[in-house]
Amino acid sequence: MADVTYLEALRQGLWEEMERDDRVFILGEDVGLYGGAFKVTEGFVKRFGEARVIDTPISEAAIVGAAAGAAHMGMRPVAEMQFIDFISCAYDMLTNYVATARYRAGLPTPLVVRGPCGGYVRGGPFHSQNVEAAFFHTPGLKIVYPATARDAKGLIKASIRDDDPVIYLEHKWLYRRIKEQLPEGEEVLTPIGEARLARAGRDLSIITYGATLWKSLEAADQLERDDGLAVEVLDLRTLLPLDDAAIMRTVKHTNKVLIVHEDTRTGGLAGEIAARINEQAFEWLDGPIMRVTAHDVPLPYAPTLEDFVLPQTDDIVKAARWLAAY
Amino acid sequence: MASRTAPTTQSSPVAAGLSRDQLLEIYRFLRLTRTLEERLTALYRQTKVVGGLVRSLGQEGESVGSAFALERGQHRDFLSPLTRNLGAMLVMGVEPVQILRQYMAKAGSPTRGREMNIHFGDLERGYLGQISHLGDMIPVMAGIALTFKMRGEPRAGLVYIGDGGMSTGAFHEGINFAAVQRLPLVVVGEYNHWAYSTPPARQFAVARLADRVKGYGIPAVTVDGNDVLAVYEATKYAVERARSGKGVHFIEVTTYRRKGHAEHDDQHYVPKQELERWARENDPIDRYVKRVVDSGWADDADLKDIDARVAVEIDAATDACEGEPLPAPESSLAAVYASPAAAERLWFRGL
């Protein structure tokens, strides 16, 4: 067992799938000789060659479109967006072409589009985005968002093996910040569509994903220490399709729900999750379903502004305390 | 690796129709750009720059030379720079203190701490800041040029694009639209050899960017981008042509990015000898100095005097803003829309 960072876990997962299956290949900007802007694919071109690790022009629509064509023909492409913010340039390809391919034409399109997401890094409005909500509304796509090193590895492997197109969102704030012991010589796979109970509790549930899992866990520890509250934390891991069963299980266990995400509030995933709880577990609720999210503004650059706009651990503590007392 | 570019156009032996004062003004902008970036590097190393730092070392000549060819001032020509066109911004009237504030995310910065580096603009003074999504400014500048045409104003737009940015769909759509509409737009394509780590051969399959652009049915020329006066002359011709209603013109400027993509990038993928050769033999400022001094248009003392004044100016600008505050947290909610004036402060902040 060795300590592995989130980034290294992702890298291992990609590497193992490239070794296991020669249909898997990588394409993206600066992924080859440079090894990717964050070094996720460092060393890949040396091991797997330029034919399977393709440096592309700055052309996101071409990257995703070419991945789709190759996927139809039996390949397993993994397309990198240098920053996930640039996936908007491939929005048409993903939502119109890729997402509908199986439904309208019976076309298998097993591809992965992955890229670094998220803020808390002073990246300004175009290197900090969370894009899940933009694709959550598109039937035909799957979306995964690992928060732990184990899931970074387990979900990239599962995404590559999945027969449908998967958007794999990785948080750059987690890349080198979190570490975990992963078993060596044993397959790490995280099933798509299954949430994980990250912390057990009885007083209140926090439903979250991505970087805010860590802020929620930190808040839960603080609430236990200072308030004697036992907070349950559910890490969604897969956003599309949502794991309704796991969500309702925690709701029925604690009867109070706080949904936390880094993305902005309006049209964010918390709204859909709240609606499902309302439909499926209304009578189990002992309080309103509440949300802690980013404010509804583009993400600004200055530390004072970014810290204000994004949800912080202290916000989660206060919101949970309020809800617990409800 | 042999460079795929060689100087193709040299400026004429006369001083491009410029006066001695103008030649010295150009020198001042070149020096100001480099000195300001050196100061930014120092601030970056002191972690006073909040995010990344983008340098234009080795490319100052094409930025300054092209922007200097515009008619500048209120409601005149209009320009949209990339992050490596600091020189063009300074020519358009941006003050060094604004750049320093912007990089340090100060409350008094042009974007009030919202955006980074030189992503900002001023519609009155005629420059528009880019966003990180490359190519987007081509259609936007086409729209600005379209407005000049619709209103019958004798104004031209100038927009920069890199050898990498030209691979985007937005570039193609924008330049094609501008060509079809015969808009008063000059597009400067910067062949600086590196799109992050990607060399030209991985970016396009033609030798010259101008070769690709000819297919849009517009004139496309290649100019030695490190010959400041050659860039000036080519741009001057193109903007006058555009202003007179003859449509879009593309100028490929050959140059070299002598720093990494940004300061974090050690550019290990760049052949060392190539880098050294461009620094030694083809620095735009060195070449400009040699040109003006050898031609007797200025002497060393004139230039040294400008260097000294620029150094004082940058020191003063740094002193003026280094201690300024960051923006107030709640100001982040303002001006998402014209109306309402501010976004909602979320419920949990009131607990």
Image (cartoon, coloured by chain):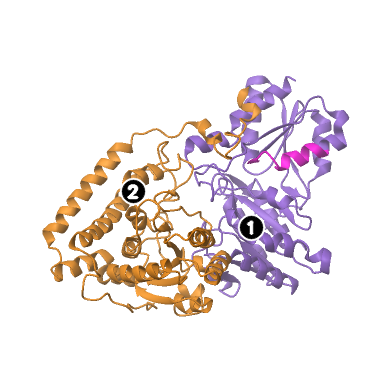
Chain colours: A purple, B orange
The reply to whether label 1 and label 2 mark residues of one chain is: no
Could you say where residue A119 lies in the image, as x and y percent from the top left?
A: 56, 44
* Label ID, residue B290: none
User: Viewer-proximal residue, B35 or B66?
Assistant: B66
- Residue B8: which quarter of the image? bottom left
Q: Secondary structure at mark 2?
A: helix
Could you say where residue A66 lies in the image, as x and y percent from the top left?
A: 66, 71
In space, the residues marked 1 and 2 are separated at their CA atoms by 33 Å
- Residue at 77%, 41% in the rendered image: A272
Q: Is residue A275 magenta?
A: yes
Disc 1 residue type (three-letter): Arg
Say left or right for B81 vs A64. Answer: left
**Residue to which mark 2 is pinned:** B40
Q: Is the C terminus of chain B in the top left, top right, bottom left or bottom right quadrant?
A: top right
User: Viewer-proximal residue, A23 or B293?
Assistant: B293
Say left or right for B77 vs A98. Answer: left
Could you say where residue B349 lies in the image, as x and y percent from the top left?
A: 61, 26
The answer for which chain carries disc 2 is B
- Residue at 39%, 50% in the rendered image: B125
Query: Please, is residue A168 above or below residue B249 in the view?
Result: above
Say left or right for B87 vs A218. Answer: left
**Residue to which mark 1 is pinned:** A114
**For the residue carrying disc 2, how many other residues have a C-alpha within 10 Å: few (<14), some (14-19), or many (20+)?**
many
Disc 2 residue type (three-letter): Leu
Q: Please state the extent of the stretch shown in magenta in the rendering.
A: A263-276
